[in-house]
Image (spheres, rainbow, N blue to C red):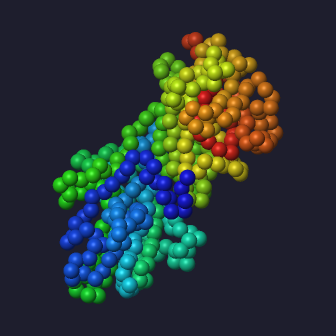
Amino acid sequence: MIDSRIRSRRSGAILAAALFIIASVPGMATAANSRTLFIGSDLSAKDDQGVPLQSGQLFPTTVTVPGDAPAPKNSTVFLVEILSTDNQNLAHTVLTVEANHLNATGLSLNTFYDPDAGGHDADQPVPCSSSGNTITCDYGSLAARGERTIAVVVDVARTYVAPVPAQPLFWAKVETNNETGPNQQLFVAASGPSSDDPTPPTPFNVGAHSEDGLNTFVPPGLAKQLFTSGLDLSGTDNLSTFISFTAHGAGDRVAITEGTSDSSHYPCPTDLVPRCQGGYSEVKTSTETFGSTPYFTWMLTAKVPKTYTLSQGFVVHFDTLTHSDWRLLFKDKSSFCGTLVITSIGHCIKSLSLSKPVGGFSTLIVEVVMDHQGGMKA
């Protein structure tokens, strides 16, 4: 789950960033510097001196290069938060965010928004504008101990080319007026690494395209369709996944994974073993439940032996890697949605088909509507 602050954005690989060193770590005062201001994606954790432990670091969510059209892009999101711990106003505070710091091919700004709508920033409209891949937010005077946050969504196209050598893809700075000469004016954060750091941490990287899965972020309120590659009836790609849903209020991180079942990953229930297919489809979203229209649509397309019959078919849903919480048998009329959008039990089969055999295999397509997600196999 993620809250309105998108705090679970780091549930995948741990992302860190090197700091751009001016005279000291950004936000830490020198002897002549009375100003303390921090910038980063997560400034909530602090040391015993009240200094954020992850200042200077941007944490984009996991994203992979998309497949072919009609899904030409995937997306990542990261927060940019500025936090003043001064007991004085900071005049003319300007935040600049570069959504493609290196001008990498296939990387572009999608949108930005205030993730705290309804929260402590609700009475402060986002004074931001964009030009190309750069966002500029002029906050004017930042009150003592003030805080501002924006969420930045960046698209990754099929044409994405990773920069070599690796450098920060996303970069942000905040500048203030220098009312007192020695005060620090520039504070920087990046998705890492930096050439100024001789031992840079692992940088954020866009994941390679996969025929059997994807990672992306869907902005709040957006209706989205996502899918993996189609079947290869002459090869080894035996399963394809298609999902459709509307992202919740804070947006949804989505991960689709296809694989082969074993004892630790979606094993076939013992009473169904002779009839189970080998593959599974796993879908994880930040929001686990979709309790209102249009709910969550999950379609599996599977290559099955020509001996496969619908009367013996089923889908099994898993709420953990090894536990199945429900099943829908194709031979039971109660498994189907019928004229209803969704049944009272929260899941039903919307459509079902089986093609004629070609080269010893048939194509099974089963579309299920549900009020949640998890793992599924047929």
Q: Position of residue 274 (x, y in %)?
A: 63, 15
Q: Is residue 169 above or below residue 343?
A: below
State the residue in front, 4 or 49.
49
Is the C terminus in the top left, top right, bottom left or bottom right quadrant?
Answer: top right
Residue 186 appears in view: yes
Q: Nearer the viewer, residue 277 or 297?
A: 277
Total number of numbered discs in the rendering:
0
Rendered image quadrant of residue 347: top right
Q: Is residue 213 above or below residue 90?
A: above
Q: Position of residue 48 (x, y in %)?
A: 35, 69
Residue at far front of view: 48
Front residue of this view, candidates 348 and 105: 348
Residue 113 in the figure: left or right of residue 247 = left
Write the residue at 71% across / 51% down. 292
Instruction: Using the rendered view, name the quadrant where residue 182 is placed.
Output: bottom left
Q: Residue at x 29, y 49 (%)?
A: 202
Position of residue 209 relative to residue 377, above or below, is below
Report the residue that reaches farthest toward the bottom: 179
Residue depicted at 67% across the width and 20% down the height: 271
The answer to whether 220 appears left or right of 325 in the picture is left
In the image, residue 342 sits, relative to residue 196, either above or below, namely: above
Could you tell me residue 280's position as x and y percent? 56, 29
Question: At which x and y percent is residue 151?
Answer: 47, 63
Nearest the eye: 84 or 370:
84
Splitting the image into 4 quarters, where does residue 335 fall?
Answer: top right
Residue 33 appears left or right of 302: left
Instruction: Tell whether 169 sits left or right of 181.
Output: right
Residue sitting at 69 percent across and 17 percent down?
A: 309
